[in-house]
Image (spheres, rainbow, N blue to C red):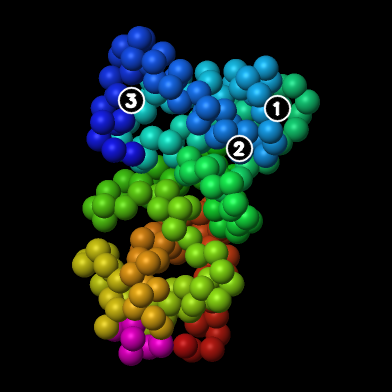
Amino acid sequence: MDNKELEIILNAANDKDVKNDFLMKEEQHILKLTAKICGKSLSMSDDEWSVGLNAMSYAIDTYNPDKGEFWSYAAIVIKSRLTDHYRKVKGSEVLVDGDAFSGVLDEEANDSGLRREIASKTMVTDYDPVRDEIEALTEELSDYNISFFDLAGNSPKAGKTKDTCVSILKAIFTPPPLTESIKSNKSIPVKELSKRLKFSKKLTDRYRKYLIVSTLILDGDYPELSEYLHDAKMAIKSIDADGR
């Protein structure tokens, strides 16, 4: 999102005309995003469209840049409203596409991994431990110039890349752990890691945010979020068993 669009959204919260103009301009984007969250095609005659549009209006009213990127936040609000809608109508559950969680509309995406899990579990309810952990993590990440949504948007897709990232995370936690180095320097200690594991520096550059966010989750008090990093969590647990 560029600064101009951000300014419009912030103004829209206090100016009904600006909001209506924005909603009208973005109605196709909102419709496609809502359809992607639902996992089915929609038209403006469907109930879901009204739910999505009202949710977008609410997202504009309640958005704060501290919540992360606007479209990512809006996707959470839309999902929450749709979840409530389906529960009331037929008690069904919304099937969420992981890309929709970040507000990105990639028609060719086919990733059923971490991003889909996070998206399907994260909703705004009266009590939601996942949401509470996301809020706490977002505050912790403020010093890193990273958003929680970078975990969803920058997670590795390919099996080999996933395995390598798991190996890197395991190496980070292998005694003596490098977690404090990451927290102090706000970066991946590539030089130290290279002494423990062979990997491509290009890969760590590409997935730097993912590796940092994952490290903070696995090293912190985030039991719900850590479940979405199951493979890495199990690899780290195995350190005590095999000593490396």
Magenta includes 193?
yes
Q: Which x, y percent locates residue 143?
A: 24, 53
Q: Residue at x 61, y 38 (%)?
A: 36
What is the number of the mark on residue 124? none
Depth check, mark 1 against mark 2: the one in front is: 2
Span highlighted in magenta in the image? 192-198
Q: Residue at x 69, y 33 (%)?
A: 41
Q: Residue at x 75, y 33 (%)?
A: 92
Q: Answer left or right for 197 relative to 32.
A: left
Secondary structure under badge 2?
helix
Q: What is the three-letter code of the residue carrying label 1?
A: Tyr
Secondary structure under badge 3?
helix
Disc 3 crowd, CA 10 A, few/some/many (<14, 14-19, 20+): many
Q: Which x, y percent locates residue 26?
A: 45, 25
Disc 1 crowd, CA 10 A, few/some/many (<14, 14-19, 20+): some
Residue holding disc 2: 37
Disc 2 crowd, CA 10 A, few/some/many (<14, 14-19, 20+): many
Residue holding disc 1: 86
Quarter of the rendering containing residue 241: bottom right
Name the quadrant of the N terminus. Answer: top left
Q: Which x, y percent locates residue 100?
A: 54, 42
Q: What is the three-letter code of the residue carrying label 2?
A: Ile
Q: Which x, y percent locates residue 225?
A: 51, 54
Residue holding disc 3: 9
The residue closer to the viewer here, 207 or 217, is 207
Is residue 63 visible from the viewing direction of this image?
yes
The residue closer to the viewer here, 243 or 120, is 120
* Number of numbered discs on residues: 3
Going from the N terminus, do you reach mark 1 or mark 2 first? 2
